[in-house]
Amino acid sequence: MIKYSFSLLIGAILMILTTADLSAQERQTERVMVSPNASVSQTIGLTDILVTYGRPAVRDREIFGGLVPFGEVWRTGANESTVVVFPEDVRVQDEMVPAGTYSLYTIPGEDEWTVIFNNLISWGTQYDEAEDFLRVMASPEDSHYVEQMMIYFENVSAEAGDLVIHWANTKVPVTVEPVAELPDN
């Protein structure tokens, strides 16, 4: 019980520190953005994952294979880099990712996407492949229509959850699993 309470306290402190770090990345602005900023957090097991991103809209455009070309790096959102904070070590698609803050990029494909966790947090499209920490593959799925891009979590349990990128009629789930063991109840 004490170990569990201590873990929750450390997790809360890390979340406060990483949230302050995200504010320092100038995601807040004094003007109304065409693609508004959003954030989502999800607890999986004892790990609180935070994602901040810009939400572009379809606005009668062809998205994947059009505005977002197949086979090219996409910043996966609008304005600045999408940021994912893992306060503890996790596995993404069965690959180990140490605790930290990463930018999220993707390379969309018709049948398979490359999902990239990059160490460089930047404005716009200042992507640097040399800063890639991890690349994993994910399968796009046809889904209901979403006008503004969304990132959310589904299929969440104590052991895992899917981080989902969803825009237009396409969603791409990526499995995230905490590495920390849950306390015995």
Image (spheres, helix red, strand yellow):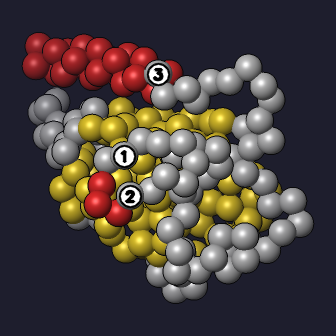
Find residue 143 and report its horizontal and vertical position in percent: 67, 70
Question: What amino acid type should be assigned to the residue bearing mark 1?
Answer: Leu
Task: Measure the alpha-carbon separation of dots 2 and 1.
Answer: 7 Å
Label 1: element kind: loop
**Which residue does the numbered mark 3 point to in the structure image?**
24
Q: Is residue 61 left or right of residue 63?
A: right
Find residue 131 and report its horizontal and vertical position in percent: 30, 55
Label located before the other in sequence (1 or 3): 3
Label 3: element kind: loop
Instruction: Verify CB contact (< 8 Å) between mark 1 and mark 3.
Output: no
Q: Is residue 163 something that shows in the picture?
A: no
The structure residue drawn at horizontal position 41% and vertical position 65%, both measured from the top left corner, is 115
Instruction: Verify CB contact (< 8 Å) between mark 2 and mark 1.
Output: yes
Label 2: element kind: loop
**Which residue does the numbered mark 2 point to in the structure image?**
128
Task: Measure the alpha-carbon separation of dots 2 and 3.
Answer: 21 Å
Task: Measure the alpha-carbon separation of dots 1 and 3.
Answer: 14 Å
Label located before the other in sequence (2 or 3): 3
Check disc 2: other Cα within 10 Å, few if <14, some if 14-19, many if 20+: few
Check disc 3: other Cα within 10 Å, few if <14, some if 14-19, many if 20+: few
**Which residue does the numbered mark 1 point to in the structure image?**
120
Find residue 21 and report its horizontal and vertical position in percent: 40, 23
Q: Is residue 149 left or right of residue 162?
A: right
Question: What amino acid type should be assigned to the residue bearing mark 3?
Answer: Ala
Quadrant of the drawing holding the N terminus: top left
Q: Quadrant of residue 123?
A: top right
Label 2 vs label 3, nearer the camera: 2
